[in-house]
Image (tube, rainbow, N blue to C red):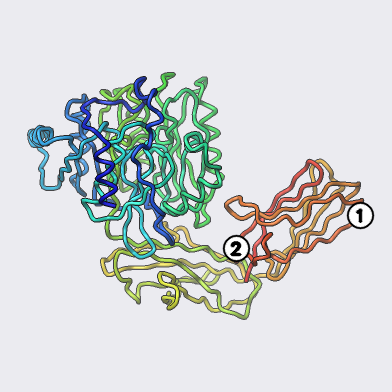
Amino acid sequence: MATLLCVVLLIAQADNTILPVWMTPEESLRINEIGKGHVVTAPPGGWVETPAEFEPLRGVFVTWRWNTTYNSIFREIVREVVSSCKANIIPASASETTSIKNYLTSGGIPLDSVRFYIYSNNSVWSRDYGPWFMRKQDNTEGIVDFKYNRPRPLDDTIPWRIGQSWGIPVYGSPLVHAGGNFMVDGLGTGFCSTLLYEENSSYTPQRIDSLMLAYNGLERLIVLKRIITEYTGHIDLWTKILNDTLIMVGEYATGHANDTVLDNRADSISHCKNREGFNYRVVRIPMPWSTASAPPTYLNSLIANKKVLVPTWSLAEDTTALRIYRDAMPGYTVVGINCSSMSGSGGAIHCITMQVPSSRYVHIRHIPLTNTTDTINPYRVRARIVTSSNLITDSTKVDYKINNAPIFTSVPLSAVVDTPGVYVGYIPPQHRNDTVYYYLVARNIQSIRRTSPVDCPPHVYKFLVGPPTNIEGHFAAMPDCKFVVYPNPAQKELTFAINLDEKSNLKIEIYNSLGQKLKVLTHNVFAPGNYSLKWNLRNDRDCPLAQGIYFYRIVINDTAETGKVLLVR
């Protein structure tokens, strides 16, 4: 990789031009150079997890161009960051480094938590081209480098330089993807706008999903339409993930072109669940009225450990915005930083920073248990855990209780010998109609503790030990066409009993939670009558499906009904 990096650096020539977040007219004539010199590598292999911005940080990167009007903003960011982690500053030269050091010192900021990395660069927009850190299945770190969506070769090499300097492997993704259009919840779900599809039109959405899974561990992408008029198309101008279940979305006053647009975006997010099965909650924050292509926003903030750095604009809404952050994030210190000098630039604090997750971590991936009819066998709780150090055996466990029991009982989570990184625990079998509540906890020798669900309590998993149920329904446009799907949960086969009152084109399809079609059970014309179609719980390649939730789609002529069923093994 070092050899490849040297080749890239030879391609990139020194450039002192200060570039905006948008593409300049001159750059628009060189769009064929986007990604020139970008190194695509194989993905890391195995399970990976991209940590969220709100998780503990060990540092923040800023690319500080001294001859900009943003010096005071950079200084205030560094002032707040160094109180809890490192400020990693990227100047373009030794003379810039000296000027920045003197400026920080004169502002009363100590340099003991500041590190300088002199890398030639094109622009200050480190969010868009910076390194995306992730955890790997072998309990080590990696960096993912996307193609920067600007013809700026010096910026595009910075993740490789950081990886080389820090001794962290870098994985070059083939996707064009600006960091301002990428947020994660830390549980395998990413958020972005349709810009991702626009800038990677040679790939299908399914292929993009598979690449984001392979490189970044994203099991799901929530892709939202761009808002109107705004130039960049970046999601970080109108959305902010505050924690694993809380997302902030901007709100324009009635009459603005993006008023109902953002209402719809907020509604869409509120109907989604995270990997742990909990709905995302949405909090709204006002957007200053603007019809410009680079509007001001309070969403372009940075979470740095227990601080939230929020851009302010010397507007009446500033006070309200800071209050909403404080109400939504109790326990955090919310600091407003005046970004008026960036007005009209297309970005703010988030756009000129890039977080570095803590090197001490525990990540747990667990698929929640679902309702069961089994009252004989123990309930297997399975999890994949990545950790920066060895786990403490007595503190890696499943805590469970039955019904309204006042306390939880613990059973160990033990390593699976032939499957590194996988742990299993067993909850004893329970009686019919019992509800089992449980959560997972793991602690490593660095005293890092993680639970699954993350917010535990109040969130815990639960499942019911009960009899199987049938799913009954009818088609709104054809009330005499009725169907029953049974049993649910299904263990050996699933039956679709359908009554057709007229000759009809009937299609039944099965999908997984990612929306991928797994099986077409039937697609034929049927005469009026009653039909019973059985599915053996296998996909179109005749491979048995794993335990979990699946979705069916019954289409009669042009009318469709959907639902979900549970498969148990």
x and y, in percent, of residue 541 in the image: 67, 62
Q: Is residue 139 above or below residue 472?
A: below
In the picture of the structure, the residue carrying the numbered disc 1 is 529
Quadrant including the C terminus: bottom right
Quarter-of-image position of residue 107: top left
**Res 134 visible:** yes
Residue 130: x and y, percent?
A: 31, 42
| Among numbered discs 1 and 2, the one appearing first in the sequence | 1
Q: Residue at x 24, y 39 (%)?
A: 10
- Name the outermost residue toward the bottom: 376
Q: Eyeballing the image, is 333 above or below 549?
A: above
Q: Which residue is mark 2?
A: 548
Residue lying at 32% horizontally and 29% vertically, measured from the top left: 319
**SS assignment at label 2:** strand
- From the viewer's perspective, tell me whether residue 529 is left or right of residue 64: right
- Which amino acid does the dot numbered 2 rest on? Gly
The kind of residue tagged 1 is Gly
Q: CA distance from mark 1 to mark 2?
A: 32 Å
